[in-house]
Amino acid sequence: MNNTMKRHRWLLNGGLLLSLIVLVAQTLAPSQAPLTSLWSAQAAPLLHYSWWPRLFMALLVGASLGVAGVLMQQVLRNPLATPLTLGVSSGASLALMSATLMAPSVLLIGREWIATLGGFAAMGLVLMLAWRRQLAPVVVVLAGLVINLYAGALSLVLLLFNQEALSGMMVWGAGSMAQNGWHDLNFLWPRLLGSVLVLLLLYRALNLLELDDASIKSLGVPVRPLRLAGLGLAVFITACSVSVVGVIGFVGLAAPALARLTGARTLGQRLWQAPLLGALLLAVTDQLLQALGHLTGQLMATGAITAMIGAPLLLWLLPRLSLPASRPSSGDASEYRHRHPRRLHLLILILLIIAMVLALGWGQLTAGWQWSLAPEALTWRWPRMLGAAAGGILLALAGTVIQRMTANPMASPEVLGISSGSAMGLMLTLLFWRGATTSSLIIAGTLGALIALGLLVALNRRHDFQPARLLLTGVAMAALFDGLRTLVLANGDPRGQQILAWISGSTYYLSPTSAITAMMLALLMLGITLLLARWLDIMPLGSATASALGLGMTQARLTLLLLVALLTAVATLMVGPLSFVGLLAPHMARLMGWSRGRDHLLGAALMGAVLMVVADWLGRQLLFPQELPAGIVATLIGGLYFMWGLKRSQ
Amino acid sequence: MTYRSYRFITRLLCLLIFSLPINAVAAEAPAPTDTTNTRLKPTRLVALNWTLAETMVGLGYQPLGVGNLRGYQQWVAEPRMPDQVHDLGLRIQPNLELLATLNPDAILMPAFYEPMLDRLRPVAPFKVYKLYSTETDLWHRLQAVTRDVAQRLHDPSAADQLIHQTDATFKYWRQQLAQAASEPPPVLIVQFMDARHMRVFAKHGLYQLVLDQLGLRNVWDIPTNGWGFSMASIDELAQKSLPAETRLIIVDPMPLGVKERLQHSGLWQLLRPVQQQHVLNIPAVWSFGSLPSVQRFTRLLGAALVNDLAATNPPKTAARPQPDNAISP
């Protein structure tokens, strides 16, 4: 068997090399490019200053993202870990945006350095949050996710208010490989070379990370510094590449996954195959785009398009990946259990009512802060308040179900990609249908969610809806959406503002009827979910226990999945796809001590409602007359609580 | 929640709120130059976007409210909007409560804001304008919009005056250009996004409108979007064979640091207009504006070109001094 494996691998590796050679040969073709144009500008200046640096840049960036991906997956022992999981690119992007707006002169020091600084700051926060838990993989990924969402929300706020000033930043965010000299390449390669040297030094120790913590410790290797070094290196590599060409996210996930698929088992094999694959993936995509780009007059940014091409690739890969079948429910933030869950429910309900009354009566107008329950003011306030509460309930329910079902603290409706599907429907309608009305948007959003759900079910049914697989499907869907969004924004269409407004989760477009409908739907869904609460108590125990207790796992999962999709679709239409509440509310409920399925659901729903009502109110009042979308404010408030909870729990 | 946790959260929240540069002003913001519009007549109409607001000011009227007023002062700059005008918040999501309290007679908005129509319906009557699109000629559309806005202000003659004034500006600069050169040079109009990418303006856009009226040829023939520009990187510019006399017009604001980076770019240095020193910088003009912006761009472009032509091929009668990019009034 060993022999066949070896031959198999040889074939694949040979195939890879061959394709690389073919690529280089093919790319030489465009205008009988003489090889001399590589080092001399005389014969063909365009090739010398643009085409060659661009090819090398694509190869270099693809390779470095592949290496960074392998490193992170090794350190975090998580197939979902990517260079972006730690918030590196969102941190870098936030830093660049803030610098552009507040102190543009700082950019003169070098954009690269600002980006690197931001990336490191974001990772520093992630590590700080996970420090007390020995940088355990699940906690690091979770902290990274939170920081990512947080930085993303802050960037969205800046974009909403400064679309014109940040148009250049949006181009950067889409990741373009265009080059006009050797300057950037000369910046990048020495840094990557240095990183490779450090990697060689760390290589033997990193190999040990495949064992569990106790065994590594017994070998006398300090786990925490080792992880820190591995992550630090990965972030540095990512930040360097990203700061030069912009955000190119998908390669860091796809390259290591492809390497694994082609049979790379050991760290050594993955470390040389993933970069090769990454370089190929990016360079081939970029070559194709170069050919297409001139025809359209649009910026066909490689980063965004790679993400969009990579998404179907990942979906195709999914059934072929061998993933850990099930994961024990470990690393959850807290096992604390409240003694009187009912009393706590009542308390939060009272809190919710107080919040609702305050949100209705207290507000700013031209004359400043006023308390008023006059009907003229209320007509504008109550639909948004009610809609926000409904959105909070729906997302909290969806989040609770998916987290308990998959026993994965990273799971949320957004991670499953249903919100992404819905948002894509909205976006395409806004772009291609002039004069789209609210009702047409609702239909488009629902259609998008249904298509995403259909894909989700079709791809995961045969595999029994395994958690890791489900999450990967969601990641692919989110990548597709992200690519589309960044592409639209990068091209500077003034309608980008409208797209931003929708996707950042505002209650702005809610009419009285739609708000009442939403609330009734939310309450109905709450009832249905509570009826299914027993399943949620059993499922985390594993399929063996579940079937022993008479629960058909596949059927139950399918039912719950449908429920989640429905909950998410309705909520997305209400408060946008930025469903941080869906991740947050169940966690907060957990932290507060609701542990049984029924209590957890009800508690999470209440927390979700409180969170959204407060967020919507703050968003409308804080910067009056400018309005911050409720989804963003919820992310900003909730994210803080979440970080605090993560830091507190030991 | 314990006291410590509360303190942690409030501190972080404070930090966050104070660190948000929501209204930060970019350094290259064009300085307002026009102070003639001090005696605007007040109206009870609000304009949700800057193009319509600019039209109203151009007609001599002061809107009741404008979406994102600060952004208007920064990016449209001229004609200047009086500070008494109410800021309605985000252009795309004007504050409904505030709008209702202001109780305007009508709301003017562009067609692509339509998803919020349902929410605006109870506030006031509204008028939706098709401004920028690929469908019909921009110059005719802007004239029609101007006339319609004037109608709503019950002052149709103001539109005639504004249109006439714009025509006169065209005519004046057309003559100036004809005097400066027997055959006006082709142009390429760009605005830098970063050191590698730029918007190149052509068909369907405001700048093209001005080029057409001045009889100037645009060398950019790649399709543009409904707003009249396409995104391009420097290598795409380099692939075009530009006539030697092409003037490369760079519209401000230029992102900081880009000028320095271009010095290092081998490809930029190879561009024909750069080698010939035919690069002209002109101050920022709102690229998606209406007649006032059209006039402003005509003046700035005309002056820049005439100065440059005079400097590069001095007329036989009176030789002019050294190249001077400063714009004469």
Image: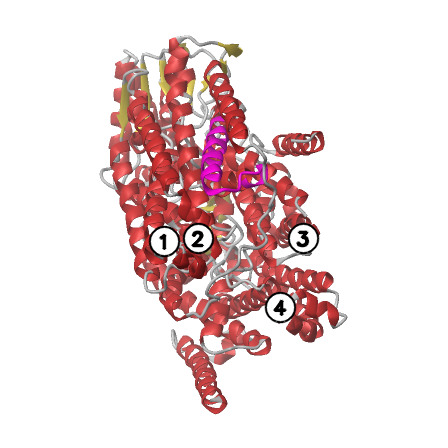
For discs 4 and 3, the disc positioned in front in the rendered view: 3
Q: Relative to A355, does residue B105 appear above or below in the rendering?
A: above
Amino acid under disc 2: Met
Q: Chain of mark 3?
A: A
- Residue drawn 74% across the image and 73% down it: A219
Question: Does label 4 or label 1 sit earlier along the sequence?
Answer: 4
Q: Which of the numbered marks, if any, corresponds to residue A189? A: 4
What is the C-alpha distance between the residues marked 1 and 2?
9 Å
What is the C-alpha distance between the residues marked 4 and 1?
48 Å
Q: Do discs 3 and 2 share a chain? A: yes
Queried whether the magenta region covers residue B8, the answer comes back as no
* Residues shaded magenta: A590-613
Q: Which color scheme is applied?
A: secondary structure
Q: Give residue B224's position: percent from left, percent from top.
A: 32, 48
Q: Which of the numbered marks, if any, corresponds to residue A539? A: 2
Queried whether the magenta region covers residue A597, the answer comes back as yes
Q: Residues within 10 Å of mark 3 (few under 14, many from 20)?
A: some
Amino acid under disc 1: Arg
Question: Does label 4 or label 3 sit earlier along the sequence?
Answer: 3
Question: Does label 3 or label 2 sit earlier along the sequence?
Answer: 3
- Asked whether the viewer can see residue A370, the reply is yes
Q: Secondary structure at mark 1?
A: helix
Q: Residue furthest bottom?
A: A3
User: Is the stretch drawn in magenta largely helix, strand or loop?
Assistant: helix
Q: Chain of mark 1?
A: A
Q: Secondary structure at mark 2?
A: helix
